[in-house]
Image: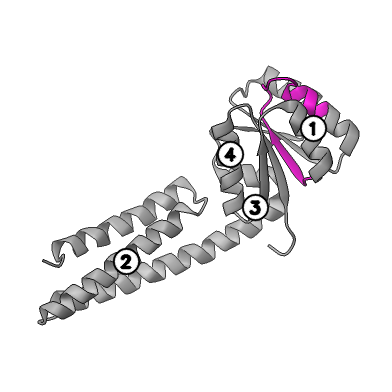
């Protein structure tokens, strides 16, 4: 990403706020977290983030009040996204009245949150994910080809060496998958390919 896109995440649930910030950081976004509305206002003024992702129900100052204050102090250039478990029509009306630009349920995937925050950032991240997925699939294809050679290798040391190497490569793909905000269907498809290769490697595991 050529220019850093910064986000402030505000949620009384510390685990949730920190998890969202971590996922955004992994997507190449500069994200920080806070846990109450008053501090969110202070941090927004100090950090001048591009967007604020904020739970509406927070201690000290609610997300509604914080959104109104941020909008008044920082203007329309700040993207305000309500991140809440409640998505009824009445709740959405109240969110809009408070000055939020959009509302995303907490059940939404990371890519949906990115799309709502910034379509440009979303598209950049998606392109990066596609490149990473292609690289992972290339790794899996190479692993499968090497495993075919392991199946026919007569020398047990060669077989064992290939199998040990494959185990390392497969775990590398797994580690890469964990760091990407993949859509559920794509993650499941890649995971299926990984598990199929793992089973083949285990059948010929070094003794």
First reached walking from the N terminus: tag 3 or tag 1:
1
Q: Is residue 62 magenta?
A: yes
Residue receiving disc 3:
122
First reached walking from the N terminus: tag 2 or tag 4:
4
First reached walking from the N terminus: tag 2 or tag 1:
1
- Secondary structure under the numbered disc 3 in the rendered image: helix
- Secondary structure under the numbered disc 1 in the rendered image: helix
Q: For the residues marked 3 and 1, what is the alpha-carbon distance in whole angstroms?
A: 25 Å
Q: For the residues marked 3 and 4, what is the alpha-carbon distance in whole angstroms?
A: 20 Å
In the rendered image, residue 26, in percent from the top left (x then y), is placed at 57, 53
Q: For the residues marked 4 and 1, what is the alpha-carbon distance in whole angstroms?
A: 18 Å
In the rendered image, residue 95, in percent from the top left (x then y), is placed at 74, 25
First reached walking from the N terminus: tag 3 or tag 4:
4
First reached walking from the N terminus: tag 2 or tag 3:
3
Residue receiving disc 2:
168
The label number, if any, that marks residue 2 in the structure image: none
- Give the colouring mode of the picture: one colour
Q: Quadrant of residue 16?
A: top right
Residue receiving disc 4:
18
Residue receiving disc 1:
41
Along the line of sight, which residue is nearer the eye, 26 or 97? 26
Along the line of sight, which residue is nearer the eye, 179 or 76? 179
Q: Quadrant of the C terminus?
A: bottom left
């Amino acid at each position: 990403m050529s220019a850093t896109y910064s986000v402030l995440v505000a949620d009384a649930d510390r685990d949730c706020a920190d998890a969202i910030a971590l996922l955004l950081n992994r997507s190449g976004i500069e994200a920080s977290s806070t846990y109450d509305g008053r501090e969110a206002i202070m941090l927004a003024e100090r950090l001048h983030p591009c967007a604020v992702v904020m739970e509406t129900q927070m201690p000290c100052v609610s997300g509604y009040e914080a959104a109104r204050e941020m909008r008044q102090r920082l203007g329309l250039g700040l993207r305000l996204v309500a991140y809440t478990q409640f998505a009824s029509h009445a709740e959405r009306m109240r969110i809009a009245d408070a000055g939020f630009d959009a509302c995303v349920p907490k059940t939404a995937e990371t890519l949906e949150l990115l799309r709502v925050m910034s379509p440009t950032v979303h598209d950049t991240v998606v392109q990066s994910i596609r490149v990473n997925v292609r690289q992972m699939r290339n790794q899996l294809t190479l692993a499968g080809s090497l495993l075919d050679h392991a199946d026919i290798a007569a020398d047990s040391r060669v077989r064992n060496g290939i199998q040990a190497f494959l185990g390392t490569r497969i775990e590398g793909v797994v580690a890469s998958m964990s760091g990407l905000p993949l859509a559920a269907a794509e993650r499941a498809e890649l995971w299926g390919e990984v598990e199929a290769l793992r089973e083949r490697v285990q059948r010929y595991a070094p003794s």
